[in-house]
Image (cartoon, rainbow, N blue to C red):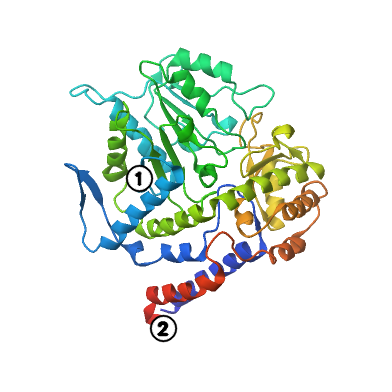
Amino acid sequence: MDAFVEKTFNLVKKTIENNRWRQEECINLIPSETTPSILVRLLEISDPSGRYAEHRTMKGKEIYFYQGIDFIKDVEIEVKKELIKYFNCNEVDVRPISGQMANMVAFNAMLKFINRGNKGKPLRRMTAVMNNELTHGGHLSSQPMGALFNCVEIDPNTGRERTIGFPVRKDNPYKTDITKLDELIKKYKPELIIFGKSMFIYPEPVKEVYDMVKDMENRPVIMYDMAHTLGLYGAFQKPFDEGADILTGSTHKTFFGPQRGVIATNFDEDSPFRKLWIDIKNRAFPGATSNHHLGTLLALLLATIEMNQFKDEYQSQVIKNAKSFARSLKSYGIDVEGDESDGYTKTHQVLIRVKKYDSGEVIAKKLEENNIIANYQALPDDESFINCSGIRLGVQEMTRFGMTEKDFDTIAGLMAEVIVYNKNVKDEVKNLRKNFLKMKFCLPDKESIELTKNLLNSIYSNLSG
């Protein structure tokens, strides 16, 4: 018992120390992370976090396989309504528990869809898929080594999956070469085209591709993995308005949510892909999930309500902050990727090149030692992540804690002190963060404090004495 108590106390003590370090002393700039509001975080650990609510459509009726789930059933319905409002689309499935799983569900549903009517025949893979290559910012989950594993035919000439990377422009490798893209689509006739990146500073050419393929006899499905920019839907890009069929994403990067995934579609009743939605739902359950983490599902509902309330102000400030941050970094002598005439970025991300000072990995570690949290990144002309040239930055989390353009100029100056002059600015960073501890774009403290107390008491009623 003594050892048990000691281990418990040590774990909790270290967790508290980490909480205070990351939430009170650090400038968090990783583009794939955010801190949810306090009520969203508390909802994650409410009673549903230990429950099940498996369900599927059978003979036109939604069948649930557990009892005591009326509350969480209504929550899931409301989450879908709020997300349909956010995306202005027809259908949403919220059972995937990560963006990676959402992609896996979509890819496996594609296999089911293209094999409809092939009873008695061996299941075939997709003949070809177009995606963003890893070296050009593509996300791991959209690669054969990720969620696309075993979904694409092998090219007998190369021994590799037949994936075709989007061609990039010579003058700007972060933008697609539209002329070459048209040629590749006509040549390879992919069955699935996957937009979306993890190194993401410009919109994807969804409309251009839709116009290229819309009159094809068997046109490809257009999918957009919007994991990094889900919280910027509308202000950054509206893929459904441009012709996308499927949208996937994770809900915890620029979106306000807990760590989950989402799949949305906009098929109308006459769409040739309408049955693909049935396959997506079946791959979500029972194909990929059993328990779909009901605590975070509950939290996602509040996060989406927050997003629908505050998205215009939040999205606008994120994009303004990113552009201002990029300009400030450049003014302090740091090389910024992207086109200056575009403001270097149109998302929450800013990409910098640091190789003349040291590798991206070394610089990222130096920044961390000064309480500036970023992550190293391979840029398009790097051979791999080993000894890479770049740092990837995101402004979304600190924007939500109230930072504006002038504050990101201060951060840029502190980063230059570390990167260019190898100075220690840890105390300055800690002092700066002290001014930004209250979260914006959520229920104000006055209204949320009492709710927080009541929620904690309901979760841990045995501690009330």
Q: What percent of the width, then of the height, locates residue 246?
A: 41, 35
Looking at the rendering, in which quadrant would you find the N terminus?
bottom left
Residue at 52% x, 59% y is: 36
Can residue 147 be seen in the rendering of this structure?
A: no
Amino acid type indicated by mark 2: Ser
Q: What percent of the width, then of the height, locates residue 24?
A: 64, 66
Residue toward you, 423 or 403: 403
Give the labeled residue for mark 1: 93
Q: State which tag comes first along the sequence, 1 or 2.
A: 1
Q: Residue furthest bottom?
A: 465
Disc 1 is placed on an element classified as: strand
Disc 2 is placed on an element classified as: loop
Looking at the rendering, in which quadrant would you find the C terminus?
bottom left
Residue toward you, 18 or 402: 402
Amino acid type indicated by mark 1: Asp
Residue at 54% x, 55% y is: 310
